[in-house]
Amino acid sequence: MNQPWIHNPKIDTIYILSPPIIATIVVFLFHRQLLHIEHNHSFLTWLVLIVFIDVAHVYATLFKTYFVAAEFKKHKTRYLLTPILGLLISIGLYSVDSLIFWSVLAYVAVYHFIRQQYGFMRIYARQETKKYWKVLLENTTIYATMLYPMAYWFLSPPRRFSWFMPNEFFVFHYPKCLMYLGYLYVFIVLMYLVYIAKVFYDTKYFNIPKNMLIAGTAMSWYVGIVAYNNDLVFTLLNVVAHGIPYMALVYVKDVKQTENKPVWYKHYLQGTIGIAVYVLVLLAIAFSEEFIWDILVWKEQFSFALPNLSKWHIIIVPLLSLPQLTHYILDGFIWKTTKPV
């Protein structure tokens, strides 16, 4: 049986499978240096991790949806109603309490991150037998690699990092429950290791991308949330493991494939120059958004003598969050028919 790559071994390994593994290795080898970077180069970490990876990957969705006339026409109602309803709901939540708004957005983000890894795993398992117990074990394992770290976050003493905002999650200290969940997590992982060992013994086949995906997910989520209690470590592992694979997948699945795409996809987004254009467009849009966020809301990276706009945050914050929320919602639809290339 051939290895079930999405694109090819090189692209998959470099851009989809290795980012969480490499990021985890960097944390292990250079965690002290990361502390220095966190305290002395906050602008650089913000620019690279938040702007150029986390926010940029959100706008990669444009190349699969709004930038493609045929796709937009096909699902016009969905693409118009999603941001409209998202904005109205966001304004409603923010008008009740800003923390409620950020909490809802955080839970939706966690769900989105978890489902992306599950989706990758199912693609890489597509060629294997669909026996119920096998699929159940694979699904349980990939979910456990993320749900146990999140349970640790919810049930342990406060972490020194947040997804968006402090106190966004409902947390309480419950060590006994956490202990049992830890046992369950170890049991699930051991069961999966026994399973893949048996498959290899019986068939001499080892699904490289699927197991790299599961291993990278387990490493990045456990190290980023459980093993270390540090904001930069969490951010690095969180956004690198999620954002880089997403941008790569959009390019190889949609931007590079020119069938039914706008003419400018064929002229400007192909080859090495096309990759550069794709990346630069994402970086430019992402930086523009975060620049506006900072001067209007956060006021952390840039200093401008603007009037206090806090009374307008009920509109400004939902508007600036809308691309992210739209990305989370649409992502549940646009990959349903994804096939390898």
Image (tube, helix red, strand yellow):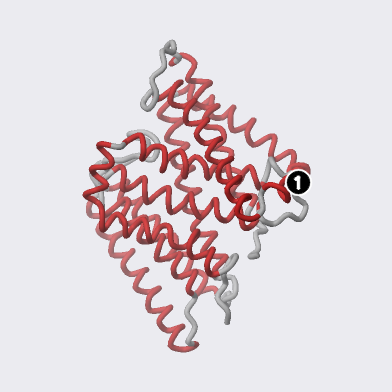
Residue 155 visible in the displayed image = yes
Q: Quadrant of the N terminus?
A: bottom right
Quarter of the image holding residue 22?
bottom left
Is residue 177 visible to the viewer in this orientation of the structure?
no
Residue 285 appears left or right of 49 = right
Mark 1 crowdedness (10 Å alpha carbons): few <14, some 14-19, many ≥20: some
Instruction: Give the position of the C terminus as an image quadrant.
Output: bottom right
Q: Which residue is at the far top?
A: 307
As drawn, 220 above or below 312? below
What amino acid type is highlighted by mark number 1? Pro
Q: Say which residue appears at 47% left-offset and 27% top-offset.
A: 293
Identified at 62% across, 57% down, the residue is 252
Q: Residue 44: x and y, percent?
A: 36, 38
Task: Return the residue nearer the eye: 82 or 214.
Answer: 214
Q: Residue 173: where, in percent of width, then height?
A: 24, 45
Q: Nearer the viewer, residue 54 or 312?
A: 54
Nearest the viewer among 274 and 122 is: 274
Work out whether 258 lies above or below 54. below
The image shows residue 171 at horizontal and vertical percentages of: 31, 41
Task: Give the quadrant of residue 305.
Answer: top left
- Against 5, is 231 above or below? above
Q: Is residue 126 above or below residue 229?
A: below
Residue at 24%, 48% (x, y): give it: 33
Q: Secondary structure at mark 1?
A: loop
> Left or right of 185: which side holds 54?
right
Residue at the image position 42 percent from the left and 51 percent from the top: 240
Q: Position of residue 30 (x, y in %)?
A: 26, 53
Q: Is residue 149 left or right of residue 240?
A: left
Residue identified by numbered label 1: 262
